[in-house]
Amino acid sequence: MIRLSEQRSSMLHGVLLMALFSCAAFYIGGMDFVKSLSFSPMIVGIILGMLYANSLRNNLPETWVPGIQFCSKRILRIGIILYGFRLTFQDVTAVGVPAILVDAIMVVTTICLGIGLGKLLRMDRGIALLASVGSAICGAAAILGAESTIKTKPYKTAVAVATVVIFGTLSMFVYPLAYRSGLLDLTPGQMGIFTGSTVHEVAHVVGAGNAMGKVVSDSAIIVKMIRVMMLVPVLFAIGYLVARAAAKGGNGATERAKVSVPWFAVMFLVVIGFNSFNLLPAGLVDFLNTLDTFLLTMAMTALGAETSIDKFKRAGAKPFVLALLLYAWLVGGGYLLAKYFVPAIA
């Protein structure tokens, strides 16, 4: 009994440490300079976690590690479920069929392309899949969801997050500049669909959209949130494929694949449905969104805390090469779809 109590106390220390880092991430994220970069507290959190991993980590008790891992797994899933309070099914109908189809095409092709390029580059399959899902759907949040499904090592998740942060941040500055200079010959509505269907992080979409005007911003954010909803079927597909691969690798000829159902993804969808009825006061929804951001920040910080420079070196340059190639596809393919496909079916 005493032993169990000590274990719980040690775990609590790790959780509280991540909570403390998350408070710092929120404070830093509120600074004007950080806001100008559209860095969410989640991104600040993983940076703080990585700084901790490469400095103070070796000076703290190893008994705190279970608490850190608890944040990167259990609290992560709670955060993804609560993420549903940011969405409603009305958002989907607001932009219509064209935007939904563009989102679906970009998500499927980006993931398939990423997996194929990962094989050509002979890089780690886990990192390739995570980077592809992050590029295709919603950056860090999608990577966290996929990580919970395939159960990869934390440093691989951190590497994948780093790739989408770099190119998502680049988009936030490049898209408005290209749009206002006339380099992108798109209407405001088309630009909104292009931005929402290709930029990585929600925060980056907000930053880029606001720099291009209200019409672009409104449609871009809605299209982006539709991409977030697509995380659910993607996680189910990943779970099924992982189970099949595991079954083929088994010794028994009749071994059947057991699909790991991502129940947190199902609950995410249920929360979206509940939120669509608009039953909760706006103030409570705002509180839940803030709480959700805090929980996801704890998860991101915990993942960063498991990532040392040595592990980045082990991953090599290939993940960033893959992310660059996927970024080129997002920009090129997304532009062609927004320019020619949307007017054709609208």
Image (tube, helix red, strand yellow):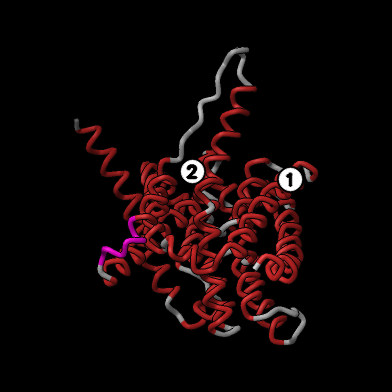
Determine which residue is flagged by label 1.
118
Sequence-wise first label, 1 or 2: 1
- Local crowd size for mark 2, using a 10 Å CA cut-off: few (<14), some (14–19), many (≥20): some
**Residue that protrudes farthest toward the left in the picture:** 1
Vertical placement of residue 86 versus 262, above or below:
below
42 sits to left or right of 186? left
Rendered position, 95 above or below 19: below
Q: Residue 235 bears which disc, if any?
A: none
At 26% from the left and 67% from the top, the residue drawn is 284
Q: How many labels does the image show?
A: 2
Q: Which element carries disc 1, helix, strand or loop? A: helix
In the rendering, at what x and y percent does residue 291 appear? 33, 62
> Above or below — where is 46 with respect to 191?
above
**Residue shown at the point (50%, 48%) measured from the top left:** 232
- Counting from the top left corner in percent of width and height, residue 222 is at 51, 68
Q: In this view, does 214 lie above or below 120?
A: below
Magenta extent? 274-280
CA distance for labels 1 and 2: 20 Å
The type of residue carrying mark 1 is Gly
Horizontal and vertical percent position of residue 188: 63, 80
Q: Describe residue 118's horizontal placement relative to residue 289 as left or right.
A: right
Point out the image quarter for the C terminus: bottom right
The residue under the point 45% across, 67% down is: 41
Element marked by disc 2: helix
Residue 331, horizontal then vertical, whole percent: 72, 66
Amino acid at dot 2: Ser
Circle 2 is placed at which residue position? Answer: 148
Q: In which quarter of the image is the N terminus?
A: top left
Q: Which residue is at the front of the view, 291 or 229?
A: 229
